[in-house]
Amino acid sequence: MSRMGDVLAGFHAAWEFESDSVLIRYERGIRTPKLFQALGERRIPLEAIAGVTLTPGRRGTVVLRAEPRPGADPLMEAAAGQLKEHCDPYRLVVPAERETLAEYYADELRARLTEPGRPAERFLVAAPEAPLHFKAYDGKASFDGTSVSFRWSWTGASSAKWKAGDQSFPVAGLGGVEWRSPEVFEGYLRLLPRDAVAPAVQADQDPASVVFGLGYGPVHESLPFAAAVLAAVRRAGAVAAVPVPAPRRDPADIAERIRHLGELHQAGLVTDEEFSSKKAELLAEL
């Protein structure tokens, strides 16, 4: 990374090394994992990387991998370790003849890592952008950036979901997202409430969930969706956590209220103690 724009090309992706980040561009070939094609490209700030490894690969290849810091990437947080190795977006497979070059870049990256051992306090990698949608087995999930909507299908949705009706969830009311890969048994996407405990029911009975199945909710559609919702939920939570200062009162209004309070005091309707206490409260609002 001695120069801006150095590129290391591998199978299915190329990494461009910048002074403060790595830009990963994924190929769109028929052999490229669909998740990579859906992501297109991703910029990974160096502060989002915890470590770098270079290991032998299969059939005359080596594997360069950047390890994201916990909490730095909404995609990896939503995946929660469920991605298969060949779908790992932080993994670059290169021919063995480029091992010396890959080792050089690995050393350069390691030398620039600032806080490799610490979890990130906020997301440092951009989430996929809304609007996003995908078709689940029991309905269609849509996300417009501010709310998640579930519209149930005639054939797949349970009676519990039909009774509840189509659902809309503002991100401000959500506390998180639970994604269970469609590549395992009973995969689903569940929205978690912010201030309440999620119901202990199966996903096919929960109106805050959509379930996957063969051909429904594939990884390249449902995982970016989950990551985008999770990032929006975290942003909403951060905004809610910022204290909003109380608006300052109009001095003329405060003066008028003190004058009126004085009249009540002179008329004997307010005691000396009540007058002093209330006057102090009013003056504190200035």
Image (cartoon, grey):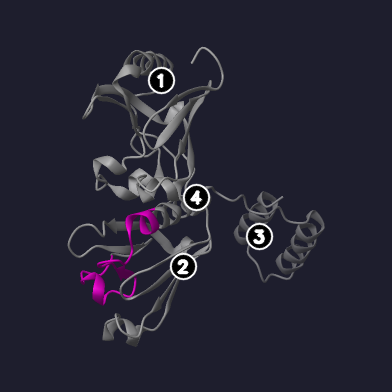
Residue 151 position by quadrant:
bottom left
* CB under 8 Å between discs 2 and 3: no
Q: In the rendered image, is residue 124 in sight?
A: no
Between discs 1 and 4, the one toward the N terminus: 1
Report the disc number at residue 113. Answer: 1
For disc 2, the marked residue is 142
- Mark 3: amino acid: Phe
Q: Is residue 219 magenta?
A: yes
Q: As rendered, which of 12 and 114 lies closer to the eye?
A: 12
**Magenta-span inclusion, residue 115:** no
Residue under the image location 29 percent in, 20 percent down: 96
Q: Which mark is residue 185?
A: none
Residue range of the region highlighted in magenta in the rendering: 198-223
Q: Please name the residue that numbered disc 4 is placed on.
A: 235
Query: Which residue is the site of mark 3?
Result: 275
Q: Residues within 10 Å of mark 1 (few under 14, many from 20)?
A: some
Disc 2 or disc 1, which is closer to the eye? 2
Which circle's residue, 2 or 1, is located before the other in the chain? 1
User: Which element type, helix, strand or loop, lies under badge 1?
Assistant: loop
Q: Indicate the amino acid at tag 4.
A: Arg
- Mark 1–mark 3 distance (CA, rounded to whole Å): 62 Å
